[in-house]
Image (tube, helix red, strand yellow):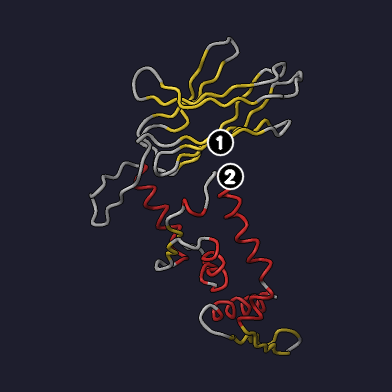
């Protein structure tokens, strides 16, 4: 079976550049050889369901972050399967007006990107090497206001100033189950006194003995705009808001 998998993998690689490929496996079973020729069209037909599954997570991610295809400027292809022409075409169709970057070896893109991000996290000086990197960053702390068990207001830092953009943070809040509505407030700290950016209210919640668990997701785009969504985990009630970047 391993021989057949290796042969199929070699044929798949060949079909990324050729219209057809031969899959030959020496002595596959009981001394019998396996020899098969497959066209790119046949390969694409057999793998069509897998290609659709590969594109679906992109759609889900766009929906989750509140972005549309028009918000994306460039798409970097990564992973060996990004060489498959049909998959590239499906991504082009999804991002019709977006530049598709495929010049870098797809097998190396993730490793190179991780190395660059690691350099930024350890404080490597921009311009300290011939290949300098410039990234957009959050200019101020983005805070979430909560109320603790004593009733005191507590601010949690979701996005510290200097966070590379785009960025996404996930936070779970708890509120008394006796309440039928809960409020979430987002603040920006540019001075000693935080400035409120947004207020989201989840209404018509079912009262219960246990606490309400609120799943909050905050996404900041490169231009500094924010998208905030809240979901009450028990009822599934959802509220979302978008905040434009300050001009």
Q: Residues within 10 Å of mark 2 (few under 14, many from 20)?
A: few
Residue 178 location in percent, x, y? 72, 16
Q: Is residue 195 above or below residue 93?
A: above
Does label 2 or label 1 sit earlier along the sequence?
A: 2
Relative to residue 30, is residue 231 drawn left or right? left
Q: Nearer the viewer, residue 41 or 21?
A: 41
Callout 2–callout 1 Cβ contact below 8 Å:
yes
* Residue 110 x/y as whole percent: 46, 57
Residue drawn at (36%, 52%) of the image? 116
Q: Residue 105 location, x and y as percent?
A: 43, 68
Please give left or right for residue 188 compared with residue 36 in the image.
left
Count of numbered marks: 2
Q: In the depicted view, which residue is nearer to us: 103 or 202?
A: 202
Residue holding disc 2: 64
Which numbered tag is attached to residue 217? Answer: 1
**Relative to residue 128, is residue 171 depicted above or below?**
above
Instruction: Describe the element under mark 2 as helix, strand or loop.
Output: helix
Tell me where residue 172 sits by quadrant: top right
């Amino acid at each position: 079976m391993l021989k057949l998998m290796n042969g199929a993998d070699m044929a798949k690689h060949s079909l990324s550049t050729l219209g057809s490929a031969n899959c030959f496996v020496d002595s596959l079973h009981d001394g019998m050889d396996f020899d098969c020729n497959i066209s790119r069209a046949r390969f694409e037909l057999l793998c069509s369901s897998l290609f659709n599954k590969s594109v679906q997570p992109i759609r889900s991610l766009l929906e989750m972050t509140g972005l549309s295809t028009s918000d994306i400027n460039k798409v970097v292809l990564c992973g060996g399967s990004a060489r498959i022409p049909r998959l590239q075409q499906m991504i082009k169709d999804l991002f019709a007006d977006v530049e598709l970057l495929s010049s870098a070896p797809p097998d190396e893109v993730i490793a190179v990107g991780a190395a660059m991000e690691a350099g930024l996290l350890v404080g490597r000086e921009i311009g300290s090497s011939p290949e300098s990197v410039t990234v957009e960053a959050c200019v101020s702390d983005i805070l979430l206001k909560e109320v603790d068990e004593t009733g005191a207001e507590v601010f949690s830092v979701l996005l510290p100033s200097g966070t590379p953009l785009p960025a996404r943070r996930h936070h779970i809040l708890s509120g008394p189950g006796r309440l039928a509505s809960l409020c979430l407030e987002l603040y920006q700290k540019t001075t000693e006194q935080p400035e409120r950016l947004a207020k989201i209210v989840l209404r018509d919640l079912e009262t219960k003995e246990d606490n309400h668990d609120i799943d909050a997701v905050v996404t900041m785009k490169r231009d500094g705009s924010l998208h905030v969504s809240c979901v009450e985990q028990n009822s599934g009630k959802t509220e979302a808001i978008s905040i434009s970047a300050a001009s």
